[in-house]
Amino acid sequence: MAQEEARGPSIKAASLWGPAKDELTQLLTEDERAQLSVIASIVRIKKGAQIYKTGDTASAIFNIVDGVVKSYRGLADGTEHINGFLFSNDLFGLAEAGQYVNSTRAITNTTAYRIPVAALESRLRKNAALEFHVICRLCHDLRETQRHAILLGRHSALARVSMFIQMLEQHQAGSSGNTNDIPIPMSRSDIADYVGMSLEAVSRTFRALAKQQVIGLTNHRLVRILDRDRLETLATA
Amino acid sequence: MAQEEARGPSIKAASLWGPAKDELTQLLTEDERAQLSVIASIVRIKKGAQIYKTGDTASAIFNIVDGVVKSYRGLADGTEHINGFLFSNDLFGLAEAGQYVNSTRAITNTTAYRIPVAALESRLRKNAALEFHVICRLCHDLRETQRHAILLGRHSALARVSMFIQMLEQHQAGSSGNTNDIPIPMSRSDIADYVGMSLEAVSRTFRALAKQQVIGLTNHRLVRILDRDRLETLATA
DNA sequence: CGCCGGGTTGAATATGGTCAAAGGCTGTGG
DNA sequence: CCACAGCCTTTGACCATATTCAACCCGGCG
């Protein structure tokens, strides 16, 4: 199939009431994407650059075209908790009382739509259909955050890392053709801050999975799934 | 002040763009509450009763009038992960592909509005203002789930339980007058499944906090905060 | 070619999990 | 009204696991 043209902001999510599908569906109509294009601007963020930080005035939300972003919060004890990794078609910029809740930083070079909240809010208040699509997306994010909480609640390191790999795999399956090769754009340290373990434990667990022939590690940034069934067992049990 | 009359479904949340407040604000107008009353019915759920379980056909969402509900998922290894505890003015019944994502069970006797999704969706599609309020509430839930994930990411038992007590305190501050006495409606086992520790560890940690004079434990279902500063320190550091 | 940041590995330690048993509250039935 | 039974909670001892601290390795980049 032909590559989808860049027609404006794109938001995908699993359906709330429709039939179960593996693929996420585009929530926005052509018309909505065009409307949003008018109020949006494209921004390019260099790898490693911070986009905004907790407490900044929340003037816009972002919709990723391409790249990977981490959403995180600095904790009082100096550590960093990563809420989630954001990919194409994701939306970020959640605010509370006019301020961003989390900090965000580009993990790879990233292109995104920047949509000012004022303009967005006025569009939303007039357009019930568009709002409904935003609701669908928020439900999707809520489910994903709940899955993250389940991951963090697991007691075994193998279970956590296995779940993490599965989540990356799903994201990969959605955006490109199904392969067993999963690129790992983030560092071990970022993974550690996401799964709630020390970076050494993450490293050890990856190696343990490789030794058990569950995954292959050609280099630290590429995982090949060798035994999907066993990965599933480790992740769920 | 006089007790608010029961005029129909009630949804509260922290504001997205307004000024920071301690109290949550009522999102629905009198008119919206009246509209929702028409399509909603009141249900009473006995303590300990399951409301629905993961995979059930999602025919309605619920809005708690009074009582406490736990939202949880049974895991493959037989353990139970609790996503959150739900109180007055909370909304629950999140679905994916027409099925409930989580299971829910009443912890105390509970009264709630039951709102069929079909009727709700048709109202939403016609009423942009109502939809906007739902969006606000979903953002609120998202932030709360993110806080839960932060709690689960903390490595120390004292930090987790301290954060948990703070969360209960906030909920208490919102619904009744500010006192230092916090009723604990859920069992140690439920707390354990929420904070990701064994129930024994939860019990030990409560006792440790009591021994350090941070909290007082008149009985296992009532916590009195003795040293709020120290609790804050333990929770954040 | 050598440096530097991220990744891996190792050993000692601490923390919470697990197993086991006793204590206390509640609700029920005599 | 009291006694008992069952469940939840607490406590203790031991053990498994991940953290910590530290050294080393590797790969990429100047």
Image (cartoon, coloured by chain):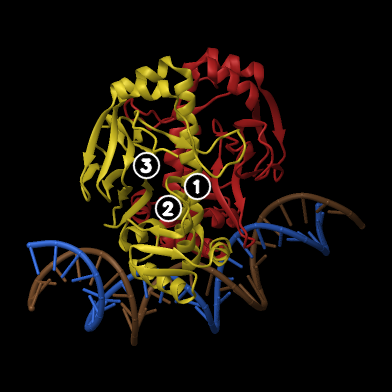
Chain colours: A yellow, B red, C brown, D blue
The foreground one among B74 and A127 is A127
Which residue reaches farthest top? B31
Amino acid under disc 1: Gln
Q: What is the chain identity of the residue bearing mark 1?
A: A
Name the residue tied to disc 3: A88
Residue B223 in percent (x, y) is at 50, 50
Chain letter belonging to callout 2 = B
Q: Amino acid at mark 2?
A: Leu
SS under mark 1: helix
The mark nearer the N terminus, 1 or 3, is: 3
Observer-nearest of A36 and B114: A36
Q: Which residue is mark 2?
A: B151
- Callout 2 touching callout 1 (CB < 8 Å): no
- Looking at the image, residue A108 sits to the left or right of residue A228; the answer is left
* Residue depicted at 26% across the width and 47% down the height: A106
Q: Disc 2 or disc 1, which is closer to the eye?
A: 1
Q: From mark 1 to mark 3, how far is it between C-alphas?
A: 20 Å
Mark 1, residue position: A146
Rendered location of residue C24, percent (x, y): 64, 61
Q: Quadrant of residue C6?
A: bottom left
| Marks 1 and 3 belong to one chain | yes
Residue B193 percent coordinates (x, y) = 56, 56
Query: Disc 3 marks which amino acid?
Result: Ser
Q: Are marks 2 and 3 in contact (CB under 8 Å)?
A: no
Give the crowd class for mark 2: few <14, some 14-19, many >=20 residues within 10 Å: many
Location of residue B93 with respect to B153 vertically, above or below: above
Asked whether B92 or B57 is in front, the reply is B57
Q: Quadrant of residue A57?
A: top left
Query: For the point 63% across and 36% down, which residue is it?
Result: B98
B131 to B75, vertically: above or below: above
